[in-house]
C-alpha cells in the first residue's frame, strides 16, 4: 500500500461529518489517516478516566471504509487537568518562567508525572487497539523537540553528564571551565543553560542539546516498548520535525524507529520550494538508510506553502508534483496536515485536503487526481534511489554553529548545507546524505564517489579517519570552510585550521577573514567569494584558484590534494550558487559522476527510484525529455520511445524497458 491521507481529527467534528469524511476519503482514494494526534483531553477527560467510545466508532468506520490508521499517542499535548494536578510537569524557560496550558507541547519530558501520564495513555491505547484490523502504524507523540530548564531537567542532565564525561574533572576539561571561572566542584552546581549575564559556555549549551535529544528519545522508546509489547507486528514511528530550535539528532534517533517518518514544509513560493522538497526527501532518505532508504512523508501542507509572514496557495499541479517528488525520493506515500480544515483553534487557516470551502474546491479536486495516480503506482514504486554523491549532515555541528561569539553573525549551517544540496540538485545529480558523527560512517562512505562536507565544524578523530580512508580508497572529498575545526566537545584543534583535515587536504588555514554582507572578494578564475575568506597556506595541495583581491591577493582559495588514490578538495571562500554549481560540476566530471538524466529542459527534474524514472516539469512551458531507450508511462500504460513531452507543471513516472 502507498500511504495517502493525512492527520484526521474527527474529535473536532460531530459524527455526521465523519460519514461525509469517510465517503470523501474513498472518493479521493485515501488509504490511511493519522488519528488522535492531539486527542488526549477527549480520550482521558479526567485523570485516569478514559473515553474510547468515539475512537472505537471512528476506527471501525474507517476500517469499514477500507482506510488504514496510523494511530497516534496524544502525548504532545497534555490536557488542562494535567497542569493543575502536576504543576511540576510543566516546562520552565531559560528565564525561569513556568509555562502553562493553552497551546500544545506544554510538558517537561524529564518530569516523572508527565512520563507516567504519557505511559498510561499509551498503554491504554495499546491495550485497546493493538490488534484492531485498521491499525497499520503507531504514530508516537508529535514532533518531539520541546525544551525545559527546570530543576527536574537539571537532575536528569547531571546524570547524563556523568555518563558522558565520567568525572567532573573530565567535564571541566571538556567544557574549558577555566575560562571565566566556571570550574565546577560539585555536580549539583551544574544546571541546564539558564538566563545569565553574557555569553554562555558553548560546550555547556552543546551538551545540553545532546542531552535533550537523548532525553526525548528516552520518552519515545518508553512508549515504543509498550506499544511493541502489545503487538510486535505493528511498526512504530514518530514524525520528525526539523528546525534550528529542535534538539533532536534524527540521524541517531532513526535507529530506534521501525519507519522513519518526516514532516516537511517547504517555505518558499518560487522554485526554491521544489529545491527544498528535494532536500527534505533526500535528507529523510538518508535517515532511513537502514530501511533501504524507505521513509514516510507524514505531513506536508497540501495546498499552501507557509512562507515567512504569508500563506501562499499552491498553483494547480503543485500538490501532485511535490507529493510525487517525495515518493520518488523514497517515501512510502504522501500524508498531509491535514484532512479537514478546522473551524477554530490555533491553526484554523492551515492547509487541508478538505478546506473550509468543502470538497468543491481546487485542492480536493487535485487530491482526487493524485489519489488515482497513486493507485496506479501502487506496487510499482519500490527499490532504492542510487546516488554517487553524498552531503554530510551533522546536528551537533549545526547546534555548535548557533552559538554567540562566532567569527561572523551570519554563519548559517542550514543555509550552507542547503546551498550545496541545491547546487547538486540543479545539476541533476542524485544526492544522498551521510552522517559523519555516526559510528557506521566508514561503511556508509564506501557507496559514494563524491562526499561534500559543508560546515562540518565538529568532528571526532574516528570520523576524520573514516573520511581519510574514503579518499585514500579513491573517493573525492570536498570540504568547505569551518569544517574540521573542533573536537566533539567543541575544543579547537590547534596548529592551523581545519585541524582534523589538514593532512588530508594538504592545507593550513592561519587566519579567517569573514566578509561583510553585500561585499565580495575577487577570485582569479573570474568568480567572486562571498561571506567568507581566509588565509590558506598549501602543504602539499595544488592550488586551483587563488584569491585576487584584498590582502589575500595571490593566496590559495580552492585547492586539491591527491591523497592515496583519491582527491581532497578544499573550498575556502563562500561561493554564490552558480559558482558553487560550476565547481561541483567540475568535481563530478573528474570523479566520473553523471546526472540522473542528461539533457533535461530548464526547470525539469529527473529522479530514479528502483525501476521507475520520475520526470517533473516545474516550468510554465511544455518540455521534451530525451530518453535513453523505449519506456512505458506507468499510469497510462502508453509506450514511448526516443523522447517524452511533459506538460507545464506536470509530473510523470515511466519505466525504462
Ligand atoms: C506540523 C505539526 C502539525 C501542525 C502543522 C501545521 O509541524 O505536526 O500538528 O501544527 O505543523 O502546518
Ligand atoms: Zn522540566
Image (cartoon, rainbow, N blue to C red):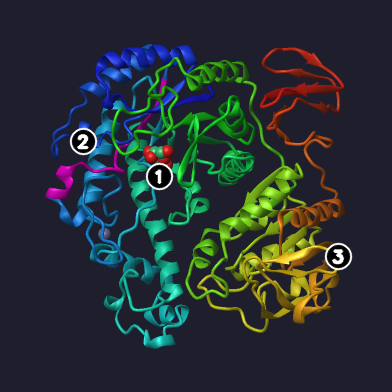
Q: Which residue is under mark 1? A: 143
Specify few, some or many for label 2: CA neighbours under 10 Å numbering under 14, 14-19, or 20 or more.
Answer: some
Horizontal side of residue 307 vs 326, given as left or right: left
Q: Is residue 587 magenta?
A: no
For mark 1, give the secondary structure: loop
Give the mark, 1 or 2, whose residue is nearer the N terminus: 2
Quadrant of the rendered structure where residue 11 is?
top left
Give the mark, 2 or 3, whose residue is nearer the N terminus: 2
Specify few, some or many for label 3: CA neighbours under 10 Å numbering under 14, 14-19, or 20 or more.
Answer: few
Residue 553 horizontal/vertical position (percent):
81, 78
Residue 226 horizontal/vertical position (percent):
32, 40
Q: Is residue 543 visible?
A: yes
> In this orientation, which residue lies closer to the viewer: 283 or 253?
283
Horizontal side of residue 462 vs 181, given as left or right: right
Q: Is mark 1 within 8 Å of ligand 1?
A: yes
**Which residue is located at x 57 percent, y 15 percent?**
372
Q: Is residue 258 visible?
A: no
For mark 2, give the secondary structure: helix
Specify few, some or many for label 1: CA neighbours under 10 Å numbering under 14, 14-19, or 20 or more.
Answer: some
**Which residue is located at x 72 percent, y 42 percent?**
430
Please tell me whether residue 8 is drawn above or below residue 565 in the rendered image: above
Q: CA distance from mark 2 to mark 3?
A: 63 Å
Q: CA distance from mark 1 to mark 2?
A: 19 Å
**Which residue is located at x 50 percent, y 29 percent?**
303
Q: Quadrant of the C terminus?
A: top right
Please tell me whether residue 256 is drawn above or below residue 125 in the rendered image: below
Which contiguous range is marked in magenta? 68-84
Q: Which residue is under mark 2? A: 41
Label 3–label 1 contact, CB within 8 A: no
Quadrant of the rendered structure where residue 357 is?
top left
Numbered disc in front, either 2 or 3: 3
Amino acid at each position: 500500500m502507498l500511504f495517502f491521507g493525512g492527520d484526521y481529527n474527527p474529535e473536532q467534528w460531530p459524527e455526521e461529518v465523519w460519514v461525509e469524511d469517510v465517503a470523501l476519503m474513498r472518493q479521493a482514494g485515501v488509504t490511511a489517516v493519522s488519528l488522535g494526534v492531539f486527542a488526549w483531553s477527549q480520550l482521558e477527560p479526567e485523570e485516569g478516566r478514559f473515553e474510547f467510545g468515539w475512537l472505537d466508532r471512528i476506527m471501525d468506520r474507517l476500517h469499514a471504509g477500507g482506510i488504514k490508521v496510523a494511530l497516534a499517542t496524544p502525548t504532545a499535548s497534555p490536557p488542562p487537568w494535567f497542569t493543575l494536578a502536576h504543576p511540576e510537569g510543566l516546562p520552565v524557560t531559560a528565564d525561569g518562567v513556568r509555562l502553562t496550558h493553552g497551546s500544545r507541547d506544554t510538558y517537561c519530558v524529564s518530569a516523572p508525572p508527565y512520563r507516567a501520564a504519557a505511559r498510561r495513555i499509551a498503554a491504554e491505547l495499546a491495550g485497546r487497539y493493538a490488534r484492531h484490523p485498521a491499525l497499520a502504524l503507531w504514530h508516537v507523540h508529535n514532533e518531539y523537540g520541546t525544551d525545559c530548564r527546570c530543576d527536574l531537567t537539571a537532575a536528569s542532565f547531571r546524570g547524563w553528564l556523568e555518563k558522558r564525561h565520567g568525572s567532573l574533572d573530565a567535564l571541566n576539561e571538556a567544557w574549558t571551565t577555566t575560562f571565566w571561572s566556571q570550574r565546577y566542584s560539585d555536580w549539583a552546581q551544574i544546571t541546564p543553560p539558564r538566563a545569565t549575564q553574557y555569553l554562555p559556555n558553548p560546550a555547556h549549551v552543546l551538551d545540553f542539546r545532546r542531552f535533550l535529544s537523548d532525553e526525548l528519545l528516552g520518552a519515545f522508546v518508553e512508549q515504543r516498548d509498550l506499544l511493541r509489547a502489545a503487538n510486535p507486528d505493528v511498526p512504530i514511528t514518530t514524525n520528525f520535525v526539523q528546525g534550528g530550535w529542535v534538539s533532536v539528532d534524527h540521524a541517531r534517533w532513526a535507529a530506534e524507529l521501525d519507519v522513519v517518518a518526516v514532516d516537511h514544509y517547504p517555505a518558499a513560493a518560487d522554485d526554491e520550494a521544489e529545491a527544498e522538497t528535494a532536500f527534505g526527501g533526500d535528507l529523510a532518505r538518508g535517515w532511513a538508510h537502514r530501511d533501504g532508504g524507505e521513509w514516510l512523508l507524514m505531513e506536508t501542507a497540501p495546498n499552501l506553502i507557509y512562507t515567512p509572514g504569508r500563506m501562499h496557495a499552491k498553483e494547480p499541479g503543485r500538490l501532485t508534483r511535490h507529493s510525487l517528488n517525495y515518493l520518488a525520493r523514497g517515501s512510502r506515500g504522501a500524508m498531509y496536515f491535514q484532512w479537514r480544515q478546522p473551524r477554530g483553534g490555533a491553526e484554523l487557516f492551515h492547509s487541508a485536503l478538505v478546506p473550509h470551502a468543502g470538497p468543491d474546491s481546487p485542492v480536493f479536486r487535485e487530491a482526487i487526481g493524485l489519489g488515482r495516480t497513486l493507485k496506479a503506482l501502487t506496487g510499482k514504486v519500490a527499490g532504492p534511489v542510487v546516488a554517487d554523491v553524498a552531503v554530510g549532515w551533522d546536528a551537533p555541528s549545526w547546534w555548535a554553529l548557533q552559538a554567540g561569539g562566532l567569527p561572523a553573525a551570519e554563519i548559517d549551517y542550514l543555509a550552507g548545507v542547503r546551498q550545496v544540496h541545491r547546487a547538486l540538485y540543479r545539476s541533476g545529480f542524485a544526492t544522498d546524505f551521510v552522517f559523519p558523527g555516526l559510528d557506521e560512517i566508514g561503511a556508509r562512505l564506501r557507496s559514494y564517489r563524491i562526499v561534500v562536507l559543508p560546515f562540518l565544524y565538529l568532528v571526532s578523530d574516528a570520523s576524520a579517519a573514516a573520511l581519510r580512508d574514503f579518499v585514500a580508497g579513491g573517493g573525492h572529498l570536498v570540504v568547505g570552510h569551518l569544517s574540521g575545526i573542533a573536537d566533539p566537545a567543541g575544543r579547537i584543534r590547534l596548529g592551523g585550521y581545519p585541524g582534523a583535515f589538514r593532512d588530508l587536504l594538504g592545507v593550513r588555514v592561519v587566519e579567517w577573514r569573514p566578509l561583510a554582507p553585500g561585499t565580495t572578494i575577487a577570485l582569479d578564475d573570474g568568480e567572486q567569494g562571498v561571506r567568507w575568506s581566509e588565509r590558506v597556506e598549501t602543504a602539499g595541495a595544488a592550488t586551483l584558484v587563488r584569491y585576487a583581491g584584498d590582502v589575500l591577493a595571490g593566496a590559495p582559495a580552492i585547492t586539491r590534494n591527491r591523497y592515496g588514490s583519491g582527491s581532497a578538495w578544499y573550498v575556502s571562500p563562500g561561493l554564490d550558487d552558480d559558482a558553487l554549481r560550476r565547481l561541483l560540476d567540475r568535481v563530478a566530471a573528474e570523479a566520473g559522476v553523471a546526472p540522473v538524466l542528461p539533457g533535461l529542459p530548464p526547470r525539469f527534474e529527473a529522479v530514479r527510484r528502483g525501476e521507475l524514472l520520475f520526470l517533473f516539469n516545474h516550468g510554465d512551458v511544455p518540455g521534451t525529455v530525451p530518453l535513453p531507450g523505449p519506456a512505458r508511462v506507468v499510469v497510462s500504460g502508453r509506450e514511448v520511445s526516443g523522447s517524452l513531452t511533459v506538460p507545464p507543471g506536470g509530473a510523470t513516472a515511466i519505466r525504462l524497458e
